[in-house]
Amino acid sequence: MSPALIVLILSLLLGLQPITTDLYLPALPALTEGFGATMAQSQLTLTALLLAFGVSQLVWGPLSDRYGRRPVLLWGLGAYVLASVLSTLAPSMELLILARAVQGAAMGAGVMCARAIVRDLYRPVEGARVMSKGLTGLGVTACVSGPLGGLLSDWAGWRVALLALAVFGAAALALVLWRFEETIQRKNPQALRPATLLQTWRDILRHPTFWAYSALSAASYGGLFTVLASSSFVFIQVLGVPKTQYGLIMFTVSFTYILGTLACRRLLPRLGVRRTVALAAGFTLTGGTLMGVFALAGLHNGWAIMLPFYLFMLAHGVHQPCSQSGAVGPFPYAAGAASALNGFLMAFVSFFVGSWLGTAMDGTVRPLMYGVWFWSVLIALAAWTVVQKHGKSEH
């Protein structure tokens, strides 16, 4: 496969995650009202998806180490398309939550394999640069998802917005079916044996580099998900922003993230992974602290939220490629299992955030602003301590 094709495939696989959440967000208040559901129930459509997404990777990872990335991708993407159609047709909130959980489990195959593919083909430092290119593609998908979700929801209703996910999944499935070539060099016939699997997980979980980078990736995604899970209610219901305008706000968030991934590629050759991550953490902490201070000062408006959050997202575009490739880097022959555990930790944090927001949302902007401040502190601590000590740039 050519380098351009690899980046395109990575972009589509990684893009499953933002399109499954971001495109859906502008429709979330209307969906909740349409079913006569509570805010806690509507949050379950996100948290159930993310819990299934995290747990499923623990299965997909060893499966891909045993049978290869290609069959896992074909099964996973096929299930994603089917679940997307089922969620579009769901007659009740309960069935929608179930369909979204299946969708999350299927999404896990694509995202987990993307991280494993990078380790299959590249060493860690080069892998971080290639991952940043794939995550730039993710950012482009996220840029389109917010405005498109708002337009589709306004124009044709929330069900059509959900149907768009099936179209995206079908495009990814077609490309993998026709052009993707197996990347795993040596399949592990023992990967699914319980004793082997437990030993592999034990080796990964004992490795300080895995924990250093996983702490960074999980905390960084926790801050992003705090905004993803609460922003549609905050902007549309609390601040009175129209759905289409909210979609454009999410576009600017994703565009800032793209700038971060581009900055990551320029910084890595000059500074290395650890110094790049440490520099970005300064932006993270500045943005999160400003947001918290604005909340304490009573500045509860869109600008007080978004201007600091742009700093957070700029750094997020650096932290994610470095941390996701760094966590998998020490395990060239168990890249699927390592990618799965890293993804599980990120999804677990997201599930925790979504569950907390389901009870913390009080009709104000405070839970969103304080939540980002909390995660920004943890990101800075991880970037300036454990990553500096254990996050070596080469393995």
Image (cartoon, rainbow, N blue to C red):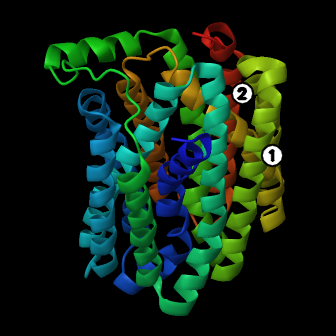
**Looking at the image, residue 120 lies above or below residue 363:** above
Q: Secondary structure at mark 2?
A: helix
Q: Decide: marks 1, 2 in contact (CB < 8 A)? A: no
Residue 223 drawn at (x, y percent): 62, 44
Q: Amino acid at mark 1?
A: Leu
Between the C-alphas of marks 1 and 2, the distance is 13 Å
**What residue sits right under mark 1 in the picture?**
311
Can you see residue 28? yes
Residue at image position (46%, 66%) is 168
Residue 7 drawn at (x, y percent): 59, 45
Residue 26 drawn at (x, y percent): 56, 74
Left or right of 350 in this view: 55: left
The earlier-in-sequence mark between 1 and 2 is 1
**Observer-nearest residue: 246 or 272?**
272
Question: Hey, which quadrant is residue 134 in on the image?
Answer: top right
**Observer-nearest residue: 42 or 315?**
315
Q: Amino acid at mark 2?
A: Ala
**Looking at the image, residue 349 lies above or below residue 355:** above
**What residue sits right under mark 2 in the picture?**
380
